[in-house]
Amino acid sequence: MAQKNTWEKEYQNPLLIKLSDEPRKDLKEYLKFLRKKEGVVLDNLNILDLGSGNGKNSNYLAQIGDNKVTGFEIAPTAIEMARSKSNEVGVDVKYIMADIGAPYPLEDKSVDLVVDIMSSNSLNESEREIYLKEVNRVLKEDGRFFVRGLCKEGDKNAKNLIKLNPGKEYDTYINKDMDLTERVFSREDFINTYSKYFEIQRLTIKTNYAKFKGQSYKRNYWLAYMKKV
């Protein structure tokens, strides 16, 4: 499984991730968009959370309605955390050890909503193509797809990382402390990559500060609202 050892070490001794139980605010905003702008009833849905981590987003999605939520995660420690919390809050989420850059153990057109919050950044190009095809395959007609990913545009730190520690593939850099390669996207690259399979309804840049080893870095992120075409 891609990056399994890296993420297992990260969940045992976090350098980058925050082990909060609070769901991403960006996810809440997306759900608000679905309800108010798209008229989607967020109840009785099949939802897939890619790279579910400690379960904060999956458990929240299961709590807001009678939704059937599945979380894919490659780090055993993260899965243990997620299952423990789901039991604590009384929701039934199916956590599966699975690589999001490999074929998914799900049926065709079986999912209403797929969520990818910072999980596909570390895929290589061949894995990314599988990820795109598999999300498209498992989504129902008019299924929805939310992505939060790394943005190159206006991000001096991203450009500096590419210059100082370039990866083998286009617009990638190596985080040597974590032994992790990540991909950043320009607007044009993001659109070209995802529009092969999905209609991009909204694509915006959000700026946040990411903490790494006690230091804050200004980073830009893509927030993409998409649906299957």
Image (cartoon, helix red, strand yellow):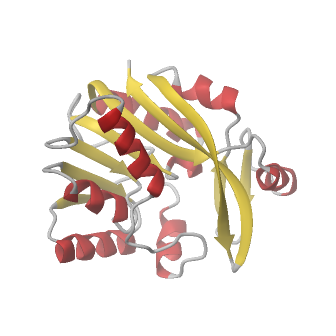
For this view, does 220 lie left or right of residue 158?
Answer: left
Image position, residue 93 (x, y; %): 20, 59
Image position, residue 219 (x, y; %): 70, 55
Residue drawn where x is 21% and y is 37% of the image = 41
Residue positioned most to the front: 36
Query: Looking at the image, is 68 positioned above or below residue 10?
Result: above
Image position, residue 177 (x, y; %): 70, 72
Residue placed most toward the observer, 225 or 131: 225
Residue drawn where x is 37% and y is 69% of the image = 54
Image position, residue 50 (x, y; %): 39, 50
Where is the N terminus found, in terms of image quarters? bottom left
Where is the C terminus found, in terms of image quarters? top left
Query: Looking at the image, is 11 positioned above or below residue 33?
Result: below
Residue drawn where x is 52% and y is 52% of the image = 118
Count of numbered marks: 0
Residue drawn where x is 27% and y is 62% of the image = 59
For this view, does 223 lie left or right of residue 138?
Answer: right
Kindly tell me whether residue 1 is visible in this rendering.
no
Kindly tell me whether residue 27 is visible in this rendering.
yes
For this view, does 122 lie left or right of residue 33?
Answer: right
